[in-house]
Image (cartoon, helix red, strand yellow):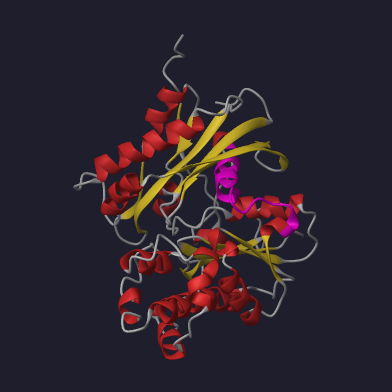
């Protein structure tokens, strides 16, 4: 599938916030980051968001799933077709359901369709192999976080905290040689991040998200609700562990009696407290925390994290990385690893029994003239 050792790979990510598709080029050999390339973003229209949101929690063959998949494929094809240098594409798809200890995981979108439309080899379905081997199937960005720490020339353990729809944490020891080495990585989902805040804003007719955390900043946190939430059994499970976007469906109900600002402040505090609680699982305290995902653009959330975490907290841009595109870059990187037969997850990242590579590989049947 790869003609050379070093390639320009194109990664795409559509996260649980359902805002749109990120796409980014990365030059890599599957081990090191050699160069960051161009990137682009294609937002979902409100109509597309509604189609995808209607299919959340559903599995293949259930109502609305085919329509959602077509919407996802079309949006991805539009943005990915803007790049002319890609030799390989990493297509994550849209997670509709995630039940690693039950039905498995479901990322809507068919890589075979994109391979034909774009006439470029596509790696997709990254999570299924991991789950079949006893893993959680998530998170998958940690192997790329390890490469980022190496690219930064970090010398001591650090943590990446991704605050998208769901929060996740990666603890990295850059002194190790490879991401699959024992003790190199620990990763897990921390809890809800932006999803319940976004849901609250939509339900109350206040927009699609709390821009700059402005509403939460004016509210008062209901500490009782936060404390009760942190008693959830999930926070007592040892990592690795993962969540689905809708694993805490009653969160907005818990804040239903609160005024808008107080409800937003309380849900923001829950996001921060969940991430901070995650640091308790780190093998040694990180020297610092780098925040990626949309949550890093929320000053109210970032201020709460700074108070709760006993180390410096900063957006990944402070380390020279692009927080908007980090996950898209991650799937470009992982696609190259899959194409080379390298592992993409390990016991410390998903709880899989042994380091394993994921992903299906689809090549176009023939180039169109």
Q: Quadrant of the N terminus?
A: top right
Residue 297 among those drawn in magenta:
no
Q: Residue furthest top?
A: 369
Image coords of residue 191 (percent x, y): 46, 70
Residue 325 among those drawn in magenta:
yes
Q: Is residue 329 above or below residue 217?
A: above
Image coords of residue 45 (percent x, y): 37, 44
Q: Is residue 75 visible?
A: yes
Instruction: Considering the whole magenta stretch, tell me its main secondary structure.
Output: helix
Near-viewer residue (108 or 215): 215
Stretch of the chain drawn in magenta: 318-336
Q: Is residue 360 visible?
A: no
Q: Is residue 309 left or right of 140 when viewed as pictured?
A: right
Image coords of residue 46 (percent x, y): 34, 48
Where residue 287 sits, quadrant-wise, is bottom right
Image coords of residue 156 (percent x, y): 78, 65
Near-viewer residue (307 or 186): 307
Q: Is residue 84 above or below residue 162?
A: above
Residue at 62% across, 22% down: 3
Near-viewer residue (241 or 277): 277
Residue at 73% across, 59% down: 318
Residue at 31% across, 84% down: 257
Where residue 272 sits, quadrant-wise, is bottom right
Residue at 46% across, 24% down: 118
């Amino acid at each position: 599938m790869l003609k050379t050792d070093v390639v320009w790979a194109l990664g795409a990510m559509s996260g649980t916030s359902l805002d749109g598709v990120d796409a980014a080029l990365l030059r890599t050999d599957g081990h090191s980051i050699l160069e960051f390339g161009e990137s682009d973003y294609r937002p979902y229209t409100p109509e597309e968001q509604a189609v995808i949101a209607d299919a959340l929690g559903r599995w293949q063959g259930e109502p609305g799933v085919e329509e959602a998949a077509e919407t996802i494929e079309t949006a991805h094809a539009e943005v990915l077709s803007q790049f002319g240098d890609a030799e390989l594409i990493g297509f994550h798809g849209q997670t509709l359901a995630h039940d690693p200890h039950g039905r498995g995981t479901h990322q809507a979108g068919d890589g075979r369709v994109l391979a034909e439309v774009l006439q470029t080899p596509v790696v997709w379905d990254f999570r299924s192999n991991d789950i079949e081997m006893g893993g959680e199937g998530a998170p998958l960005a940690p192997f790329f976080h390890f490469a980022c720490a190496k690219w930064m020339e970090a010398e001591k353990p650090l943590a990446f905290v991704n605050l998208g729809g769901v929060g996740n944490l990666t603890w990295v020891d850059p002194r190790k040689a490879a991401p699959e080495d024992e003790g190199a990585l620990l990763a897990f989902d921390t809890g809800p991040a932006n999803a319940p805040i976004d849901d609250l804003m939509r339900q109350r007719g206040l927009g699609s998200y709390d821009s700059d955390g402005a509403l939460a900043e004016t509210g008062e946190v209901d500490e009782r609700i936060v404390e009760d939430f942190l008693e959830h059994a999930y926070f007592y499970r040892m990592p690795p562990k993962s969540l689905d976007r809708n694993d805490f469906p009653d969160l907005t109900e818990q804040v239903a009696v609160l005024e808008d600002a107080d409800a937003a402040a309380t849900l923001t505090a829950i996001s921060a407290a969940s991430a901070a609680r995650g640091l308790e699982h780190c093998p040694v305290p990180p020297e610092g925390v780098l925040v990626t995902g949309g949550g890093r653009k929320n000053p109210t959330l970032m201020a709460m994290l700074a108070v709760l975490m006993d180390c410096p907290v900063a957006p990944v841009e402070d380390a020279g990385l692009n927080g908007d595109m980090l996950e898209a870059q991650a799937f470009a990187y992982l696609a190259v690893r899959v194409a080379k037969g390298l592992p993409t997850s390990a016991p410390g990242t998903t709880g899989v029994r042994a380091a394993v590579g994921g992903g299906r590989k689809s090549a176009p049947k023939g180039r169109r003239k």
